[in-house]
Amino acid sequence: MRTLAKNILLLLLVLMPDWFSGAAPAREALAAAVTDTEIRIGNVMPYTGPLAAFSTIGRTEAAYFEMINERGGINGRKIKFISYDDSSDAPTALEQTQKLVETDKVLLIFGSFGTPGNLAVRPYLNQRKVPQLFLASGDEEWSKPEKFPWTMGWQPAFRAEGRIYANYIQASYPERKIAVLWQNDQFGRDLIRGLQEGLGDWARMIVSDISFEMSDKSIDTQVDLLKASGAEIVLFDGAPAMAALAIRRIAELDWHPVFLLDNTSASIASALRPAGLENAIGVISTSFLKNGGDPAWKDDPGMKDWSSFMEKYYPDGNKEDGTALFGYAAAETLVQVLRQCGDDLSQENVMRQAASLKDFRGSILLPGIAINTGPDDFRPIEQMRLVQFDGGTWQPIGDMIESAFVGSGNK
């Protein structure tokens, strides 16, 4: 009995450090997240609610991982992609993320949509050291590795996009009156902040600044006020459905301002076509992805693969939908990270590899754009180009633009 008690005591002494540090539960979670045959990945998307148009991102990612699994998976392991609906509600996003981590035992959270929801879950994921990778949001908060080493964005920053528009206005339309119509949340505020910073003293040319809510059914009143301001340039920053309403109302008023449309809503399928393609002629935006409906890419290997993918794995999707392209390109980036991990699929190595991408040129990124990251550089895509809609597709304007800028939390 004395020997047995001694052995039990020794075992307790060995295990106690793990219990107190949380290492034992962490090892159990990792063992469930990664097996010899499976890698569990979590995601939260607005499959319902006012931003449900963006759920195409999650659907495309699910289809992409299905394709990868059919081709043998990642080093022999199949991806189990678990995606839940948050209806664009931040508390629900946190609840669903906790479920993914604590119940579903996912290795990482990938590509969850939206700024408020991702902000809500960031402290929780960083505390638990769960990678929060390649978010579907351009907030600059995702590039602060010194404070949040487990969170990394993917697309160019909204604020940087605002500065690009400011530079374009200064070069092409100096001293013209500017109006801004923006979604009343952090997404909308970030782009306006970049616009004001980029304009500098010329910010005085902003003669009207009006917001709207995601839940609004009409923005006719706001557009009417913008026209009454005498503005010659309109910058819109909001969701695709609202962009369609704004473009259509401007056409109804027979008003012809220069119309700048945020990249997030620059989808032919979900914004321009509902607005009326003839009404959208001349709209200007930014891009970092090839256009699925552009005949210029008909012989491009990456876009041929994209077309085949959509036909086989997502036949209900729209090849012209920019959100589908976004999901495909983001998933391609994650697969690159997982392949770099080899057999070391610890959460630490996932973040290490995510921060070690060197000149990765995704198959549907625009030529000249490469993904590069580092321990102090959590902004994978830092280049964009201006584009203009000609009634059928987006046409490039000028050269590629470095969207990075000096600011808090950025290199």
Image: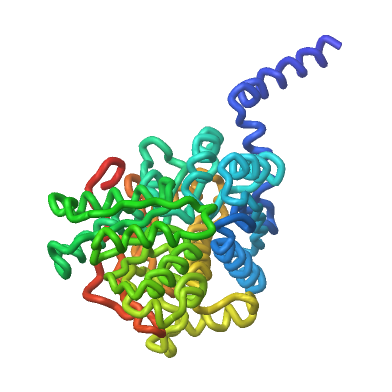
Give the residue drawn at x 57%, y 55%.
343
332 or 172, which lies in front? 172
Question: How many numbered callouts?
Answer: 0
The one of 41 and 185 positioned closer to us in this rendering = 185
Q: Where is residue 191 in the image (x, y as percent from the top left)?
A: 33, 53
Residue 366 sits in quarter: bottom left
In-image side of 18 versus 253 (left or right)? right
Which image quarter holds the N terminus? top right
In the current view of this chain or complex, which residue is farthest to the right?
1
- In front here: 391 or 302? 391
In the picture provided, is 338 more to the left or to the right than 233? right
Q: How is the structure coloured here? A: rainbow
Q: Where is residue 74 in the image (x, y as percent from the top left)?
A: 59, 63
On the image, the x and y values in percent for residue 61 come to 58, 65
For the point 71% across and 19% down, the residue is 12
Q: Where is residue 25 in the image (x, y as percent from the top left)?
A: 66, 33
Q: In this view, does 137 lie to the left or right of 102?
A: left
Camera sees residue 235:
yes
Q: Nearer the viewer, residue 240 or 129?
A: 240
Q: Is residue 340 above or below residue 387?
A: above
Q: Residue at x 31, y 56 (%)?
A: 180
Q: Which residue is painted at 67% across and 24% down in the image? A: 15
Residue 373 visible (yes or no)? no
**In the rendered view, does 53 fall on the left or right side of 159?**
right
Outermost residue, top direction?
2
Measured along the vertical axis of the image, is residue 377 above or below residue 73? above
